[in-house]
Image (cartoon, rainbow, N blue to C red):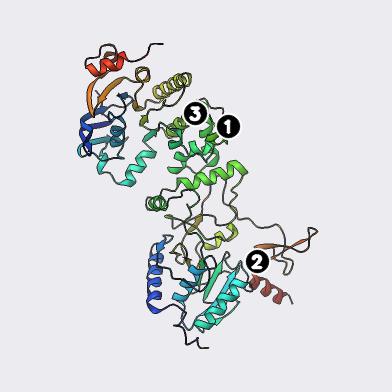
Amino acid sequence: MSVPLLQAEGLNLRFGTTTALDDVGLNLHPGEVVAIVGESGSGKSTLLRVLSGQLAPADGSVLYRDADGRSHPVHAMSEAALRRLMRTEWGFVHQSARDGLRMGVSAGGNVGERLMAVGARNYGGIRAQAAEWLRRVEIDDARIDDLPRVFSGGMQQRLQIARVLVSRPRLVLMDEPTGGLDVSVQAKLLDLIRNLVADLGIAVLLVTHDIAAARLLAHRILVMRHGRVVEQGLTDRVLDDPQHPYTQLLVSSVLAA
Amino acid sequence: MTHDPGYNFAYLDEGTKRMVRRAVLKAVSVPGHQVPFGAREMPLPYGWGTGGIQVTASILGPQDTLKVIDQGADDTTNAVSIRRFFSRVAGVRTTTRTRDATVIQTRHRIPEMPLREGQVLVYQVPMPEPLFRLEPRLSETRRMHALADYGLMHVKLYEDIARHGHVSTAYNYPVMVANRYLMSPSPIPAFDNPKMDNMPALQLFGAGREKKIYAVPPYTRVRSLDFEDHPFRPHRADAACAFCGARDSYLDEVVCDDRGGRMFICSDTDHCETRQEAAR
């Protein structure tokens, strides 16, 4: 088996009397899609913030192995190094496109920002790449100069994905990427994410409360409750044969269409 | 000439001048980096050059000759007032001749005549933060400077080109100093930006309201931001000066009547007069 891209062990974190993370461990391999499911307040988003270095755990370690094969303890990295990682090898897709996009900057500028941040200085080249990525996320490239605020919710979310994937990251963290979208748009978006992720071989950590989204995208699933991982395994195994009572409840409460 | 005995030499007290000089020294050591300083209330309103005037007051000695320009002109209110202020409180010689001056305080222009070693150019700066319009949090812009994280500035230039076909910023055009710090050159026209590069004179920038001083030491690389395929182009009105006929100086457009009549004249009055004298 390959060496994990991201390796977390024994993560603990409390907010006052609330336990946000209780001895959480996680391995993510290159090209693997792992979903973290659970109800609101189960510690999913906290885990994502801890893994991406935005929040320090009280206990435990997170190791990231970079493209050159070197391991970095995420929480001991300098802010400069972490920022560099965040705009090159990592990507973050927010639940609300407004958090991930610059609403006052055109679609092309939004997609080009990561390229320019790492030193691209050829206007024509940046624009060509931005147009190509708009096409890949199924946005008409004639709208390259439009502001994101005139886009629909689904388009904004697709634009956010283009903006993150343009620098070809190795690891993408997604926090409820389909939240707040209507069902048909969600389905299209999930389909798009699945194809792009398979094409580019990106590792994805997907936080969601949507079991269907997890089933469609993820290779493996972690079920969280009260800050603990109560069950984990291959997606089909966990969803078709849930062992833990909470997972059973979660699976049985999905509405059949 | 002696100065008004009612004031300390050059208005500010010696302790304040030392404080400003410490900030200036630090600014010179870290080219393009904004150094905070304890700006004082000055006897003129914010926006009229309170930062520049404090820097000038701190570096001025009795042997100096001072020139003050406002938009290139020696004879506008701001320039005349500041010149008269220093001739009263410091008793220094003043001049309108660029070549005779040792200290030049300026608002919005760099003189046309190339400056030489030993001269000091003091800029009045309204907003020292080049990322101000793009990132409203100063705590965040400081972090961006510390990490040299300047992608956002290029996003602004990208947007300009996407919208207008060229970079529409005509003044206060951002520059990189010594390949490290992004710096606002103060609202000088982009036409003047190339003059900052490798200038033999010392360039000091004072922002009174924002309480910041920054500097470009002599012979420092100052590069205007651009794209490879959209290189920086200084803009100049396509005309000759109506008085001296100069085709290479920066021009002001002057409306002469209410029927659309207009003329272009040199914005640098000393440059224009010198050329007119030479022609006579």
Q: Residue at x 47, y 78 (%)?
A: B60
Q: Residue at x 44, y 58 (%)?
A: B178
Which label sits on residue A83?
A: none
Q: Quadrant of residue B21?
A: bottom left
Q: Are marks 1 and 3 in contact (CB under 8 Å)?
A: no
Residue type, mark 3 in image: Gly
Which residue matches tag 2? Answer: B267
Q: Earlier in the sequence, mark 1 or mark 3?
A: 1
Which residue matches tag 1? Answer: A143
- Distance from Cα at disc 2 to Cα at disc 3: 51 Å
Q: Chain of mark 3?
A: A
Q: Is residue B89 above or below residue B131?
A: below
**Do discs 2 and 1 share a chain?**
no
Q: Are marks 2 and 3 in contact (CB under 8 Å)?
A: no
Which label sits on residue A153?
A: 3
Q: Is residue B124 above or below residue B228?
A: below
Tell me the quarter of the image containing the C terminus of chain B: bottom right
Q: Chain of mark 2?
A: B
**Element carrying mark 3:** helix
Q: Position of residue A19 (x, y in %)?
A: 22, 33
Whether residue B202 is visible to the viewer of this picture, yes or no, is no
